[in-house]
Structures are given as C-alpha cells and as structure tokens.
Image: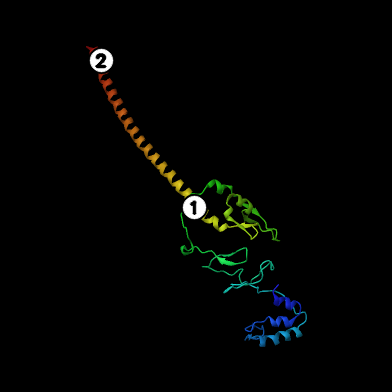
C-alpha cells in the first residue's frame, strides 16, 4: 500500500501532509483553478478531514512507480486491482487506429507493422498443413459471462502442443491465451500456397488437355485417311465387279 494511502487509512493527517511534495497540485471538483504547493494544500486536507466523516480511500488511481519511470503513467498497482472500467470507449467508433495490447505486467502498447520496427525480415517458408490441421476450432461459453453468449476460438493448451510460440503466458509461465492475430499471416501463407498448388494443377491439366487435343487431332487425321482409303478400296472393288460382269456376258 502506498504510504500516503496508509496514512489516510490510519487517519494520520500529519504523516499524510509530510508526504506531500512542495509542488503538489490539488484539483478540486468545485473550483476551476487547482491549488498548488504544500502550504496551500495542507490546510485543505486538514479541513476536509475535520469536516467529512469516514474520510477514506474509495478508489486508488496512482501507483508508487519505480526508479527510472520517467515519462510514465501508472494507474493502480499490479496484483492489487483486479478490474478496470473506463467510460466512453464501448460503442464509440474509431478508425485508422491500432489494436491495444496488454502485457502480463499491465503495460499498454500497440504492435507496429512498419518495416522500421522490424529486423531479420524473411519470407515465410511453406507452412505445414498438417500442423494447421491439428488446431481444433471450438465453440464455448465464458464462465464469467452470465448471459452465456456463444464464443468461437481455440484452446490455448491445445495450441501450445502445436505452436507454443502462439501462446500467451503470465509472469509465472501459466498459459493465459492465444495470439490470434499471429494466425492471420500464417493462414494467409497457407492460402497462398494452396492457390499456387491449385495454379500448378490447372497448368498441368491444361498441358494434358493440350496433349490430348493434339493426340485427338492426330487420330482424326488418321481416321480421315482411313476413310479415304476405304472409299478408294470400295471404288476399286466396284470397278473389278463391273469388269467381271462384262467378261461373263462375253
């Protein structure tokens, strides 16, 4: 617990005031201009403590921080608060932004896709369809969802057996989730490989059809030659029959 909060919880205003910085700023909910400086803020705290009954912490926003936390905003303490609610986000449409990620330490950030953020860039090798086939899409319900909305996804423990690099773990190594966003380029690669394979099969089929067509044309030519030969043979036989008839008449 932060020392200032501990002093407030213990109703030790002298200790709380002693912890105030010389540049402390107090923003009142009823006064537009904030109060600045320990000498100005200290009497206000004493007055508030005397006037209000049961003066205590209701919610904690700040955090103790750590050495070197310059230009850092910290809200709450990791392992203390278990729920965060921020108004004005749900239902508000936004475009052109980036998805926000949360690390196991509570740090917020985005995942850049620009080349300037990356090293060791290489084309993705051919994916193993067998490994992707081992992933089991499931439907499920979250235990904490009272409405029981059906969800779609994967089981992180099962993914860990196939693609351990796609599993999210906490600081203790316990499995927490799946990096679904990483599946998109993997599936895209698989689609591209299948498209290339289908293209090769089509090319082979066209080649086979061309060979078959050429063979069929050759057979047609042979059949025409045979038909012409048959007609010529029939004409020759007819001439012989005529000659035999003339000889018989003589």
169 left or right, relative to 245: right
Could you tell which of marks 2 and 1 lies nearer the N-terminus?
A: 1
Q: Nearer the viewer, residue 57 or 85?
A: 57
Q: Nearer the viewer, residue 245 or 128?
A: 128
Outermost left residue? 250
Which residue is found at the position 69% from the left and 82% from the top? 18
Q: Give neighbour class at mark 2: few <14, some 14-19, many 20+ (Cα, 10 Å).
A: few
120 left or right, relative to 168: left
Q: Is residue 195 visible?
A: yes
Which residue is found at the position 36% from the left and 35% from the top? 215
Q: How is the image coloured?
A: rainbow
Which residue is found at the position 73% from the left and 78% from the top? 7
x then y, percent, for residue 157: 64, 52
18 left or right, relative to 68: right
Frontmost of labels 2 and 1 is: 1
Q: Secondary structure at mark 1?
A: helix
**Residue that carries the numbered disc 2 in the rendered image:** 244
Q: Decide: is 120 above or below 202.
A: below
Q: Secondary structure at mark 2?
A: helix
Q: Quadrant of the N terminus?
A: bottom right
**Residue that carries the numbered disc 1 in the rendered image:** 189
202 left or right, relative to 100: left
The CA distance from mark 2 to mark 1 is 81 Å
Q: Is residue 155 visible?
A: no
Q: Nearer the viewer, residue 212 or 45?
A: 45
């Amino acid at each position: 617990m932060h020392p200032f909060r501990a002093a407030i919880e213990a109703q030790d205003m002298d200790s709380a005031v002693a912890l105030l910085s010389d540049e402390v700023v107090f923003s009142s909910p009823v006064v537009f201009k904030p109060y600045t400086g320990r000498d100005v803020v200290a009497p206000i705290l004493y007055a508030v403590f005397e006037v209000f009954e049961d003066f205590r912490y209701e919610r904690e926003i700040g955090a103790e921080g750590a050495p070197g936390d310059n230009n850092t905003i910290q809200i709450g303490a990791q392992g203390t608060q278990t729920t965060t609610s921020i108004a004005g986000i749900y239902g508000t449409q936004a475009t052109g932004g980036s998805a926000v990620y949360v690390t196991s330490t509570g740090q917020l950030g985005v995942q850049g896709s620009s080349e300037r953020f990356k090293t060791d860039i290489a084309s993705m090798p051919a994916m193993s369809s067998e490994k992707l086939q081992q992933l089991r899409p499931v439907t499920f319900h979250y235990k904490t969802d009272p409405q029981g909305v059906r969800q779609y996804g994967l089981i992180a423990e099962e993914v860990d057996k196939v693609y351990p690099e796609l599993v999210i773990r906490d600081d203790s190594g316990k499995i927490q989730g799946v990096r679904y966003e990483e599946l998109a380029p993997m599936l895209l690669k698989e689609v591209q490989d299948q498209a290339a394979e289908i293209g090769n099969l089509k090319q082979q089929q066209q080649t086979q059809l061309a060979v078959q067509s050429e063979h069929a044309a050759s057979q047609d030519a042979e059949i025409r030659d045979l038909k012409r030969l048959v007609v010529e043979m029939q004409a020759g036989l007819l001439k012989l029959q005529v000659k035999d008839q003339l000889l018989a008449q003589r």
